Amino acid sequence: MNNYNNMNKNEKYLNIQNNIQIYKDGVLQNIKEDANEVLIYTVSSMCNNKHTFKFFKNDNNQFRVSAGIKSLKNFGMKNDYVNDLEWSADEGNWEKVIDIINKGYQLVYAARSR
């Protein structure tokens, strides 16, 4: 896991998948308790492309989520995933946010917050 940047694309996804709880714990440690902005980094299961989910607070102090130029529909998350992601973020339940993302075509491997 420490050599993540030195792994080939297939190894990266498999390493995260095989060590999902270790990665989740590391990601959760990087998210500040009262963060106004959280960036969650993912790798795709299909082609190992990397993506960033950006959570940011709006004027009403509620989190909104964006995947940049990609539609959130492209990530294979189930059910009412947009509301589930935003409401979980509002509650500070980042573990649930990670679980929702991981159930799609992406796996979370890192995060930053401020």
Image (cartoon, grey):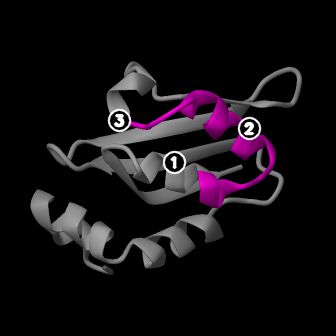
Residue count near mark 1 (Cα–Cα under 10 Å), binned few <14, some 14–19, many ≥20: many
Q: Is residue 87 magenta?
A: yes
Q: Amino acid at mark 3?
A: Gly
Vertical placement of 80 versus 38: above or below?
Answer: above
Q: Which residue is mark 1?
A: 100
Describe the element under mark 2 as helix, strand or loop: helix
Residue count near mark 3 (Cα–Cα under 10 Å), binned few <14, some 14–19, many ≥20: some
Q: Amino acid at mark 2?
A: Trp
Where residue 87 sits: x, y (%)? Answer: 74, 38
Q: Which residue is mark 3?
A: 76
Q: Which residue is mark 2?
A: 87
Q: Is residue 71 magenta?
A: no
Residue span colored magenta: 76-96
User: In terms of image quadrants, where is residue 23?
Assistant: bottom left
Q: Earlier in the sequence, mark 3 or mark 1?
A: 3
Residue 13 can be seen, yes or no: yes
Picture residue at 71% right of the left edge, 45% below the top:
88
